[in-house]
Amino acid sequence: MAVIVGVHGIGKYNYYLQAGRSAAGAAEAMRLKWDRYLHAALGGESRAYFSEIAYFSHHLRDDDGSVPRRAAAAMEAQTQRVLVDWARNLGWGEHVTGALKSFTGWLLNRLDDRSAAFAKLFAPEVAAYLTDQARRERSRQAVSEVIRKRRPNVVIAHSLGSVVAYEALWANPDLEIDLLVTLGSPLGMRNVVFEHLLPAPINGRGERPRGVRRWVNIADKDDIAAIPPDLARSFTGIDVEELVNLDWIDFHTVEKYLGCPALDPHLRPFLA
């Protein structure tokens, strides 16, 4: 059976704390969960699908678990960008996006609980990754080290993990994989992520990392992290794009994405 490595998304620092501040312990706890999620979708005999989850969340926090000071200064602006771009990409008018920008704090306290929780989790971790180069490099290195150690055929990257995996693969062109699967990816989010990618997009286009033979992107059409959900408008080299409808509320969790029927045909050839 092929080797599969996972790269986690936002809001996973709690695994690190629960594992006694052990990145290895956090990664193993997540691997067991990801295996259960995938097995629930694929059926058959229970087995280990993932060889390891590349864990990096602890690199985006200070020792006390707080958002780094440098990132905290940018956190409110990042939160506003997420909300403004969210509204703009949904087709709302400028008067609405202006209101979102002016009343970010008010909105975070009063929006639907899942949207508010998402924004609070998404903004500080993205801010930490994009504004602190040392933390960014450590996160990329954590992912590239796991890929180099495990030599996977498949990398499945969820949410912010798709950004870290994309940059890690570009930074290490010797790393070769047969299949990159991005789930609920914010890679194409304008003014928040896309323009800040390393390497920088050229003429408004990013590109599949050179060591990746095939790239499949899957996104819920209503996932507020995956803006836009279809990455092919921003990146060359995406072989398959699947827009799905996971759940009208629970539209971003890795459990829903790993259980998505659209993932099955792309993984089956590697699971024989």
Image: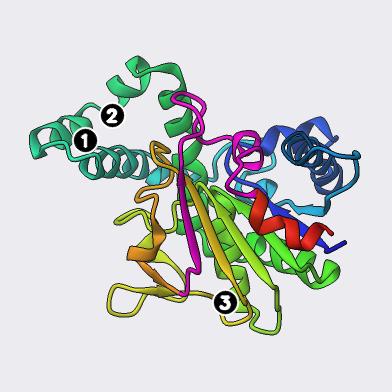
Q: Main secondary structure of the magenta part?
A: loop
Mark 1: few/some/many CA within 10 Å (<14, 14-19, 20+): some
Location of mark 3 (residue):
170
Q: Is residue 23 above or below residue 212?
A: above
Give the extent of the magenta segment. 237-263
Inspect this view and state whether residue 134 appears.
no
Q: Are marks 3 and 2 in contact (CB under 8 Å)?
A: no
Q: Position of residue 269 (x, y in %)?
A: 75, 62
Inspect this view and state whether residue 215 appears.
yes
Q: Are marks 1 and 2 in contact (CB under 8 Å)?
A: yes
Location of mark 1 (residue):
101
Q: Is residue 198 above or below residue 115?
A: below
Q: Position of residue 30 (x, y in %)?
A: 78, 40
Distance between mark 1 and mark 2 Cα atoms: 6 Å
Residue 272: quarter of image: bottom right
- On residue 104, the disc is 2
Does the stretch in magenta take in 261? yes
Q: How is the image coloured?
A: rainbow
Observer-nearest residue: 2 or 87?
A: 2
Observer-nearest residue: 239 or 116?
A: 239
Distance between mark 1 and mark 3 Cα atoms: 33 Å
Q: Is residue 237 left or right of residue 111?
A: right
Residue 135: quarter of image: bottom right
Which amino acid, mark 3? Trp
Nearer to us of marks 3 and 2 is 3
Distance between mark 3 and mark 2 Cα atoms: 34 Å
Q: Secondary structure at mark 1?
A: helix
Which amino acid, mark 2? Thr
